[in-house]
Image (tube, rainbow, N blue to C red):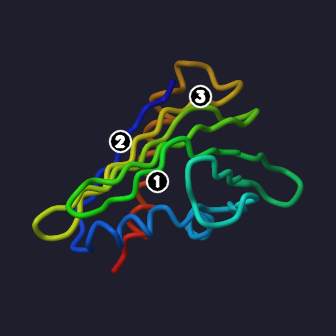
């Protein structure tokens, strides 16, 4: 299983960082060749389902996810969103932690991925690619 962690500090308040990093539709605009649909619709909560479709034309795959924990930040308390990836190609978990700081917020994104047909020796390469791609996603989402 490939595991990677990305952290960013921002001057945005925790509530605004949370809003941005859990705006699933906006994720689709930041990941190359990917669109996101939310079949359960807003608002996001435990049980919300969304699907990231990555590909060009008919060639691609769906990455269905479910929110299994939804605790937005409030009154100086950190927020935590946990996702389960349940696709036929990509499986695993992700967590997004948003912590208030004295000058804004600290966002921590952790992914644990297993990609079908990718041998385990490829996990370090997948983790490196994941850090790069999702690091750019996080930078774009938090861009002030």
Q: Earlier in the sequence, mark 2 or mark 3?
A: 2
Q: Earlier in the sequence, mark 3 or mark 1?
A: 3
Q: Which residue does the numbered mark 3 point to in the structure image?
A: 114
Q: Which residue does the numbered mark 1 point to in the structure image?
A: 134
Residue 57 drawn at (x, y percent) = 86, 60
How many angstroms separate mark 1 from mark 2 (CA)? 9 Å
Label 3, residues with CA under 10 Å away: few <14, some 14-19, many ≥20: many
How many angstroms separate mark 2 from mark 3 (CA)? 15 Å
Q: Secondary structure at mark 2?
A: strand
Q: Which residue is found at the position 64% from the left and 31% from the top?
A: 115
Q: Secondary structure at mark 1?
A: helix
Residue 72, numbered label:
none
Taking the view exactly as shown, the residue that stands out farthest to the bottom is 144
Considering the image in quadrants, where does the C terminus appear? bottom left
Q: Are marks 2 and 3 in contact (CB under 8 Å)?
A: no
Task: Tell which of 15 and 105 is nearer to you.
Answer: 15
Residue 43 drawn at (x, y percent) = 59, 65
Q: Earlier in the sequence, mark 1 or mark 2?
A: 2
Residue 30 drawn at (x, y percent) = 55, 67
Q: Which residue is found at the position 64% from the left and 67% from the top?
A: 42
Residue 109 drawn at (x, y percent) = 38, 48
Taking the view exactly as shown, the residue that stands out farthest to the front is 75
Q: Is residue 80 left or right of residue 8?
A: right
Taking the view exactly as shown, the residue that stands out farthest to the right is 58
Q: Are marks 1 and 2 in contact (CB under 8 Å)?
A: no
Q: Which residue is found at the position 58% from the left and 37% from the top?
A: 84
Task: Tell which of 107 and 59 is nearer to you.
Answer: 107
């Amino acid at each position: 299983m490939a595991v990677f962690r990305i952290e960013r500090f921002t001057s945005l308040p925790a509530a605004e960082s949370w809003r941005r990093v859990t705006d699933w539709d906006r994720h689709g605009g930041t990941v190359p060749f990917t669109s996101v649909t939310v079949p359960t619709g807003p608002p996001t909560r435990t049980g919300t389902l969304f699907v990231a479709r990555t590909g060009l034309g008919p060639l691609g795959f769906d990455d269905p996810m479910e929110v299994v924990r939804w605790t937005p930040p409030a009154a100086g308390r950190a927020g935590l969103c946990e996702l389960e990836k349940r696709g036929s190609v990509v499986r695993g978990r992700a967590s997004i932690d948003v912590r208030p700081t004295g000058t804004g917020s600290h966002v921590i994104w952790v992914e644990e991925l297993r990609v079908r047909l990718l041998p385990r020796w490829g996990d370090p390469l997948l983790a490196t690619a994941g850090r790069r791609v999702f690091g750019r996603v996080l930078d774009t989402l938090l861009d002030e």
